[in-house]
Amino acid sequence: MDRRFAICGASTIGPDIVRLVVEAPRVAAHAQPGQFVIVRVNDHGERIPLTICDSDPEAGTITLVVQAVGSTTTQLNVMTIGEHLADVLGPLGTPTGIDRFGACVVVAGGVGTAIVLPVARALTRAGNRVTAIVGARNEDHLILLNEMRDATNEVIITTDDGSAGRHGLVTDALGTLLAEGDVDYVFTAGPIPMMQAVAGTTRDKRILTVASLNPLMVDGTGMCGGCRVTVGGESKFACIDGPDFDAHAVDFITLSKRNTAYLEFESCRFDEATEAIDA
Ligand SMILES: Cc1cc2nc3c(=O)[nH]c(=O)nc-3n(C[C@H](O)[C@H](O)[C@H](O)COP(=O)(O)OP(=O)(O)OC[C@H]3O[C@@H](n4cnc5c(N)ncnc54)[C@H](O)[C@@H]3O)c2cc1C
Ligand code: FES
C-alpha cells in the first residue's frame, strides 16, 4: 500500500467540517495560494478537488478543510489519524495573482473561508492592507476566524441570523466598505449566489474582483472538459485556466446549472456512502 498520503492531523472545526493534515511532501514543496489538489479516498473512489488551505514544506504536509456535502466529502469527514488517502494529485490550477494592490477585501462564505485564507495571507505578505469579511448562516458555521485574524488587518463577521458579528449578508458589509471609498481589490470564494452578489456589488465601481470558482471537476488537468465555465463569453477550463477568474465576466447562472446537473445521481451515492459509514 502507498503510505505517502497518511492523515497526520484530523479535527472537527464546524458542523460537518473537518481540518485534515495530510502527508504529501511533493505537493507541499510546490503549493502556491489559490491552488488545489484532486483527492481519492480509496482505489475505487471518486476524484474530488480540494483547496490547499495551508502547506508546510519542511514537515511535508498540506492542510485540507472539507465540508461534508456528498459521498466523498462524507467519507473524508470520518477519516482519522493514521489512515491513508489513495491519491493526492497536485498542486493543480493557476496560482492566484498576488500583487501590491493597496486596500484589499477578501470575502468568504462558509467553507469558502478555507479557500480565501491562503490568498489573504499572500496579499498581506505582499504589503497590502487586507480586510476579511467572513459570513455564515449562524455563529456555529463560522470557521477559521483566529487564522483569518492572524492573516489580515481586520475581520468583519456577518451572520444571516445575527447570532455573531453583524446581522446580514457579506455584501452588506462590502457595500459599507465601498461607500467609505477605500477598496482597490476584492477576492471572493463561497456559494455561487454569494460570489455572484459580490460581483454585482463591485461592478459599478469597476473594482478588480476575482472569484475562485467551484465547478464540478474530474481529471483536473484540462482533458475531460467537466469544469467548463463561461467567462467573458468564452469557454474556459477552471482546472487549468482558473479556478480564479474576473468575477465581473463570469456567467454564474450557467455555472450554477452545471453544478446541479448530476444531483439525483450524487444523492444516490451519498445514501450509499452514509449507509457504508453507519454499517
Ligand atoms: C477548485 C475547487 C476547490 C474546492 N475546494 C474545496 C475545499 O477546500 N473544501 C471543500 O469542502 N470543498 C471544496 N470544493 C468543493 C468540493 O470539491 C465538492 O464539495 C466535492 O467535490 C463534493 O463531492 P462529494 O462526492 O462529497 O459530493 P457529490 O455527491 O459529488 O455532490 C454533493 C453536492 O455537492 C455539490 N457539489 C459537487 N461538487 C461541487 C463543487 N465542486 N462545488 C460546489 N458544490 C459541489 C453537488 O452539486 C451536490 O449538491 C472545491 C471545488 C473546487 C472546484
Ligand atoms: S476537470 Fe477535466 S478539464 Fe477541468
Image (tube, rainbow, N blue to C red):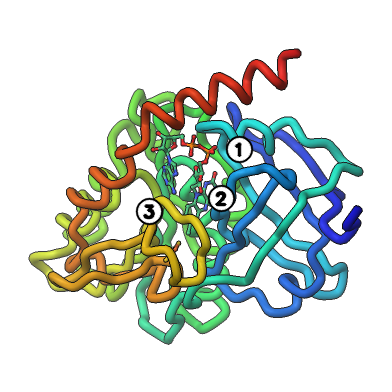
Q: Confirm or deny contact between disc 1 and disc 2 (CB under 8 A).
A: yes
Q: Kindly tell me whether mark 2's CB lies below 8 Å from ligand 1.
A: yes
Q: CA distance from mark 1 to mark 2?
A: 7 Å
Identify residue for label 2.
48
Instruction: Say what secondary structure mark 2 lies in.
Output: strand
Specify few, some or many for label 1: CA neighbours under 10 Å numbering under 14, 14-19, or 20 or more: many
Q: Kindly tell me whether mark 3's CB lies below 8 Å from ligand 1.
A: yes
Residue name at image x 43 percent, y 24 percent: 163
For the C terminus, give its image quadrant.
Answer: top right
Identify residue for label 3.
215
Residue type marked 2: Ile
As displayed, is residue 158 above or below residue 108?
above
Quadrant of the rendered image containing residue 149: bottom right
Residue type marked 1: Thr
Residue occupying the far top of the picture: 279
From the viewer's perspective, is 36 left or right of 211? right
Instruction: Say what secondary structure mark 3 lies in.
Output: loop
Residue occupying the far left of the picture: 204
From the viewer's perspective, is 245 left or right of 41? left
Q: Is residue 38 visible?
A: yes
Residue 28 location in percent, x, y? 74, 71
Identify residue for label 1.
72
| First in sequence: mark 3 vs mark 1 | 1
Residue type marked 3: Pro
| First in sequence: mark 3 vs mark 2 | 2
Residue 215 location in percent, x, y? 38, 53
From the viewer's perspective, is 73 left or right of 79? left
Which residue is at the front of the view, 186 or 25? Answer: 25
Residue name at image x 13 percent, y 64 percent: 203
Q: Kindly tell me whether mark 1's CB lies below 8 Å from ligand 1.
A: yes
